[in-house]
Amino acid sequence: MPLTTMSFGDFVFDPSGRVLLKRGHPVRMQAKVFDLLEIFITRPGECIGRAELYEALWPQSIVEESNLTQAVYMLRRALDEGGDGRTYVETAPRRGYKFVHPLRILGPSTRHGASRLPLLRSFYAAACILATVLLATSPVRTNSVPLVGRSAAAYSLGQYHLNLRTRANLHNSIAYFKQTTALAPASALGFAGLAVAYGLEAEYDPKGTRRREIDVSLAGRFSKEALARDATGPEAQTASAFLAYRFHHDPERAEMAFQEALRANPDYAPAHHLYALLLFSRGAIPAAVQQLESAHRSDPTAEVTLRWLGRAYIYDHRPGEAIRVLREALEIESADVPARLALATAQAQEGDLKGASSALRALRRAIPGLRDYVYADEALVLALMKHGHVEHWQRQRVERLLALRRIEPAEAAAFYLSIGQRNAAMHALEIARPDTPLAAALERFDPRLATLGSDHRFQQLFN
């Protein structure tokens, strides 16, 4: 089949020369990302399954599942610098992706047989292009040395993995931020990234553990390094604010640092996002929603922001909006368990109990190890569907799993309230108390527990 030059929007795609032009200027991207674009353009409007894309891009290779997600992310950013890229590449949940922008055939490629433009086969070189896109959409304002080239690439990839928030991704983000500090030791950005990454990693370990203490210590050290290089920069101030309220119990200092960060850069998405969590911990739900919405506008493809925005909409009694943004989050990362659980909660809140039940069953089938963990959620939805009537063995199973700490106390409490067992709900909450202000707020303001608000026992739990 002869190679054909195509156009879409401001772009011209020349397959024979392996070049994508935007208003006449080459758009440079990683070879795999270009290959992905070529697959989409040759099959416009067609939903292409993830398995097929893996086979086409990495034939006879075993790669991590996140490789395709990251390639789609990079392609969307390259095509849509100021948005989320979904006007070009759309996600078909649980199926795959499709190219949805209208195409126009310009004619046979005139470069067939000509020498190709140099390809960006180096991982770092490719990431530099991602860095250019990411930093263009989230401006970096710093009084220290600006990041360019390999240091900018490492920093952007560190931010990408930081936004996914899993422990494995946090390990990756730490590695990239360390590369940033090695390549640009005079810049505050890599050190600020390390401070936040180590702080988030510390949250995976219980209080008092040696590993947590080491992570918190490293987070504090790198925060000081960032402030020493750029005392007023948004990155350094945001890292300082996060650590102040999360580990040093100093919300007033955190508030001032967040305000300083947003004065330095009103569009700095991480500051809006982390500030929202501080507001959430205070019970200022509408204000937290506003901050998360600002974070989402500044960085539309940050999956963690979408997840938290969906949760905040639930607490603000806006289930329809919660469902919308949580589905967006799952388009970016379909394996996000907290987002899938929150989606089921939002569906139940909106009255779509069948949808909520279906979502929970699908999650249990997809990840068998979560069978016990989601049982209280499933039992709650079943009780709501049966107007408070459940089998005795179902209640016994919730009691057993709660005693074994295999389900969350708040989920068990919500189940007990749905069957009219107020005392059992209080007992569930008393078994294990949250160890952070944010976790306490998630329990205290949980709309499913609203009927306990006037109970003096419930009030005493949070005094």
Image (cartoon, grey):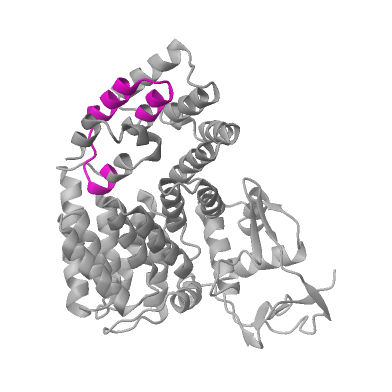
Answer with the quarter of the image where residue 106 lies: bottom right
Q: Is residue 62 visible?
A: no
Q: Is residue 135 visible?
A: yes
Answer with the quarter of the image where residue 7 lies: bottom right
Q: Is residue 59 left or right of residue 368?
A: right
Q: Who is closer to the viewer here, 439 or 81?
A: 439
Q: Who is closer to the viewer here, 60 or 155?
A: 155
Q: Is residue 454 left or right of residue 216?
A: right
Percent position of residue 424, x then y: 31, 21
Q: Is residue 16 left or right of residue 222?
A: right
Image quadrant where one finds the C terminus: top left
Please name the residue shown 38% across and 63% down the image.
291
Percent position of residue 430, x then y: 23, 28
Image quadrant where one finds the N terminus: bottom right
| Magenta highlight: main SS | helix
Percent position of residue 359, x then y: 56, 36
Please name the residue shown 38% across and 56% down the image.
286
Above or below for 399 versus 278: above
Please name the residue shown 50% across and 65% down the image.
300
Q: Tell me, yes or no, whether the highlighted magenta stretch contains residue 109.
A: no
Above or below for 145 versus 322: below
Looking at the rendering, the stretch of residues picked out in magenta corresponds to: 413-440
Q: Is residue 66 left or right of residue 274?
A: right
Answer with the quarter of the image where residue 163 lies: bottom left
Q: Tell me, yes or no, whether the highlighted magenta stretch contains residue 417.
A: yes
Above or below for 370 versus 141: above
Percent position of residue 154, x then y: 39, 70
* Farthest residue, direction bottom: 24
Above or below for 206 versus 219: above
